[in-house]
Amino acid sequence: MTHDNDGEGIGARVPRKEDDRHLHGRGQFTGDIRLPGMREVAFLRSPVAHALITRQSKPQGYEDSVFFHGDLAGVLPITTRSSIPGYKVSDYPALATGRVRFVGELVAMCVASNRAAAEDLCELVDVDYDELPVIASSTAGRQRDAALLHREWGDNLFLETSFDRGMDSVAKTAPVAVELDLSTARQVMHPMEGKGLVVWWDHRAGQLVVHTSTQVPHLIRIGLAECLGIPQAIVRVAPPDVGGGFGYKCMLMPEEIAVAWLALTQKQPFRWIEDRREHLTAGANARQHEYKLKAYADERGRLLGLDAEVAVDCGAYSVWPFSACLEAAQAGGNLPGPYDLKSYRCKTYSVATNKPPFAPYRGVARPGVCFAIELTIDAIAKAVGREAWEVRMENLVAAAAMPYTNITNKHYDSGDYPASLLEVKRMIDFDARRKLPARDEKGRYLGIGFATYTEQSAHGTKVFAAWGLPLVPGFDQAHVKLTPDGALEVKAGIHTIGQGLETTLAQVAHEMTRVPLKDIRVTLGDTANTPFSTGAYASRGIVMTGGAVSRAADMVAVRIKAIAAHLLQVKADDVTFREGRIFAGAASVSYADVGRAWYIRPDELPDNVDRSGLEATAAYKPETDNGVFSYASHAAYVAVDAQTGLVEILDYAIVEDCGRMVNPMVVEGQTFGGAAQGVGTALFEESPYDDNGQPLASTLIDYLLPGPTELPRFRIHHMETLSPYSAHGVKGVGEGGAIAPSAAIVNAINDALSPLNAVLRDIPATPERILHAIAAAKPS
Ligand code: MCN
Ligand code: SMO
């Protein structure tokens, strides 16, 4: 950058602008919105996993307050198409149409003056179900004579894919082979604020106003208009504060369609707020994968080939717009990880089951594939008798090989993966701790585990198009304007969901204009007020919208300089931004002087001043459609009690590289928050279903979320390799922290348990699973 760093621009650790209102309890979430005459919605949900609805009736006297599918005239189901050959479409109705496919599916919508009364009304609705055989696992779904969820499909596969490059010869000749069967549990996302929405009809604007808690407002506008059969111009999606999303809030939900239909047809405000039990049992699910892996290596542990089969338990329907197949597509493409792999075969199965649909969740498939490939590396190390970190060093893509295109055509743009591993090994004090006795003073077994991953971020149109998805991220836009009094307004269609964009986008705008950060106001999300963006997902915000803000702010900066130069009677090249003013030598003008000159007295400006004004909209996407790749190495040091099966994380170190950091404090917050969720995936979180498709974790007593007492003190070190493809060399970081913990922690557990010959292959690593692994261990 040509400007001097004044501690507020790119790279500065400034406190978050949004924290002031949040820390003072002045945030405004869907639950805080009160509108005159607002009525509340509760949903009657299916109590069974698979059934025909044989009869349904409304309670007498409440015919106008209870709605079934048949009442929603003209409303279309959520239909997610994909251009991938062989993909099967599911029609996901807003309210069930005679058949239910998971416990929690919406059957009736009940309306009352308050939520409690609406819930009471649900109790009065009469529905008869004729139960059908249930598919409660991906294995059951793939059985030859399995009952079908979607009869017209002929099987239960949303999609089946295969990839094969060079595996046959490897399998025959490789000196070392290891085999692993792995599984990762079903999870729910648990943003602090659940889903919720308030919808009303704006008579003045002639618009349906949708205050929904979403990551993707402009997409929801498209989806709602489509399902309601109305033009997009009469839908305004105006999300309030969003208390976390993590992927859960980047899809169109049936509740959104049903409540929007109510407000559209009744021209009254309605509200639905998801409760925690609804989130646990009926909100979308994530993470559940089964892996069958065969890996081949030479005697040093150098990988020769990987043969994989991945089955994803996708639930009953495809979510819009990401479909049920995003997970398997990501899994197949990312399984080779940060390693230089020459032969690879992968089959994926996206299986329909009688469970809530699958949605993206922080990391999307990569926590699963990182777990799979990193356990494989440790298994190879064991087979060849070397330390696991040494085998990683044999296989990691070298810095000198960058940019590097891997076997699945992922283009790793920059970085030094081996250096991150060596640094994390130093941080976790590997050499000294290796020399300690295998057990601590309490008799617990000690172990160290590593994991390295890449995080594809801000991937663009072609990548999503290759996954066959209907809506793909194109350019992101941003609008920047200098106000007459010299402040800066930044507007973008992406939304702020807790990840800090109100601050970091302001930092980017400051970097280009040097308008003091306190004078920069960032407005995000509202479709009536912001230019188009597909939204906050795939860790794309700072690369895509940040790039657009950078460009638009630069356009405005050039015009500010031209006017300032006129006021100072110098050439534009001779003015500089400094200390919140615009200087030529010792003379200076303020941003307000420039604003006044353009807006109030344009007649005094010479003809050669650009007449496009002190505002600009710019569009941006990085130079590669492939996205930019962040990466990190994690290391965990654990103690395992072989009597109780309890694991304590004694130390945890992270070395991450997300290119140029816009705000290192925000990057650390992102990484720690993600890693906390990763610890949940590794040790605690699980949403099991029984054979009847009944969810067994319906409260937070059954579904264990890690809290402060379960979390280690994460230690972090940053590397900063600039991406050659993005504005300012930035790469995304929003999901990374969540990707590696399950791999690093389970590798550490297996390292600890190696004296007992016990090996864990399934997560979460609950005491029960650990004791089971110990009991099943073969004596050495
Ligand atoms: N950042 C930075 N420098 C970088 C990279 C990122 O300062 N080199 C900052 C960004 O400016 C932004 C944050 O880190 O404030 C995350 O940026 P980015 O990686 O671009 O991610 P998005 O803005 O696209 O946010 C979405 C991403 C995803 S996909 C999930 S899932 C997730 C995540 O962010 N959900 C979150 N982080 C979350 N954090 C919170 N608190 N809540 C969620 O729901
Ligand atoms: S799971 Mo993040 O919203 O891509």
Image: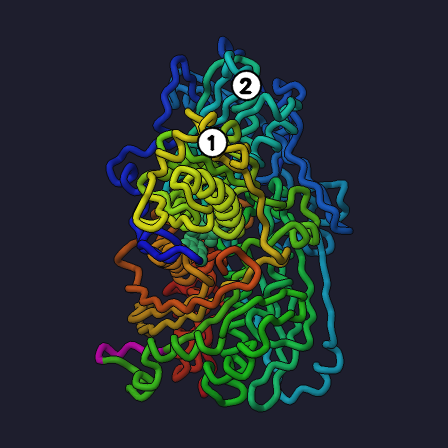
Residue at screen point 69% across, 56% down: 143
Side of 610 where 162 appears, left or right = right
- Amino acid type, callout 1: Leu
In this view, the residue in front, 59 or 69, is 69
- Quarter of the view holding residue 279: top left
Whole-percent x and y of residue 308? 64, 69
Q: CA distance from mark 1 to mark 2?
A: 41 Å
Task: Kindly identify which residue carries mark 2.
Answer: 207
Q: Left of 103 or right of it: where is 347?
A: right
Q: Which residue is mark 1?
A: 605
The residue at 44%/24% (across/down) is 271
Disc 1 vs disc 2: which is toward the camera? 1
- The residues colored magenta run 441-447
**Crowd class of label 1 (few under 14; some 14 to 19; many from 20; radius 10 Å):** some
Q: Indicate the quadrant containing the C terminus: top left, top right, bottom left or bottom right.
A: bottom left
Does the segment drawn in magenta span residue 442?
yes
